[in-house]
Image (spheres, rainbow, N blue to C red):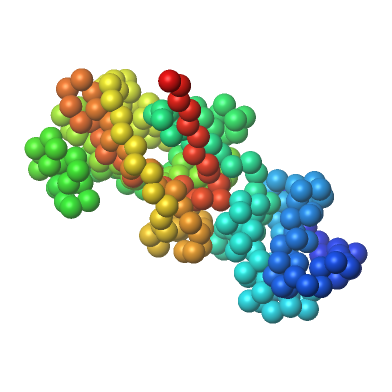
Amino acid sequence: MAVVELDADLAALFDEPGGESLPAYERVKRLVSAQIRSGRWSEGDQLPSENQFVNALGLSRMTINRALRELTGEGLIVRMMGVGTFVAGTKAPSPLFEVKNIADEIQQRGHRHRTEVVLVREEKATTASAPLSEAVGVTTVFHSVLVHFEDETPIQVEDRFVNPAEAPDYLAQDFTELTPNDYLSRVAPLVRGEHVVEAVLASPEECRLLQIERSEPCLLIRRRTWSEHGLVSVARLIHPGSRNRLEGSFTR
């Protein structure tokens, strides 16, 4: 990873002929996009700070912020709170019609998967766990919250409620060594799954875990899985929109 420098030659490109009719933020976007698409700025390179852009280009911070915010939405850059702004890699595909192990997906892309465990515990059923607890008629559920990383970038918060009858040893598992999907597939093999996909803004806590700003759009997958005995788990999987895309296929 390199830290990009805004040298005089690069700043001069902002004033190239032909762009005078464009708003200033669009010209900033064009400048940054050109460096990325040409390969001069590579995946993982750290961009200059907003203040450096302001000083080099003589624009307001509001203009620079808008340009970087829109480039984030377009998936060209990734902004991580308290860390910096980086050239994005190819968006990680998430399967829409299949239930796959996220660790396998990441490793198949040639990257390293790791998990940070936020919590794993038994809880009394609440409104949040109602889709599971009411369906299977239980008053306590198992609850886990994990953050999945691709290399050093957080790409998913997994918030899952599990039916204790289907996976009684769930709380004893080390989810830094295996994923809930991997474990549940062994003890309660999947016979049916359901996905609901939404575009959302993450909660403040989810933004902190994903290292994103509150304004970043996210993809939310609500997933329910069943074994031959009944509903096994209900999961809320949230992904930064700039780091993921959904893929699916069908035949007829």
Q: How many marks?
A: 0
Write the residue at 66% across / 52% down. Answer: 76
Image quadrant containing the C terminus:
top left
Query: Is residue 21 something that shows in the picture?
Result: yes
Quarter of the image where one finds residue 134: top left
**Where residue 44 sits: x, y (%)?**
69, 48
The answer to whether 111 is drawn above or below residue 145 in the figure is above
Query: Is residue 170 something that shows in the picture?
Result: no
**Where residue 246 sits: x, y (%)?**
49, 39
The answer to whether 183 is drawn above or below residue 238 in the figure is above
Q: Which one is nearer the viewer's eye here, 92 or 44?
A: 92
**Where residue 64 sits: x, y (%)?**
68, 71
Q: Which one is nearer the viewer's eye here, 235 or 180?
A: 235
The answer to whether residue 18 is left or right of residue 250 is: right
The answer to whether 102 is drawn above or below residue 29 in the figure is above
**Where residue 193 sits: x, y (%)?**
30, 29
The answer to whether residue 188 is left or right of residue 199 is: left
Quarter of the image where one finds residue 197: top left
Q: Residue furthest front?
A: 252
Write the residue at 17% across / 46% down. Answer: 130
The answer to whether residue 150 is left or right of residue 121 is: right
Write the residue at 18% across / 52% down. Answer: 127
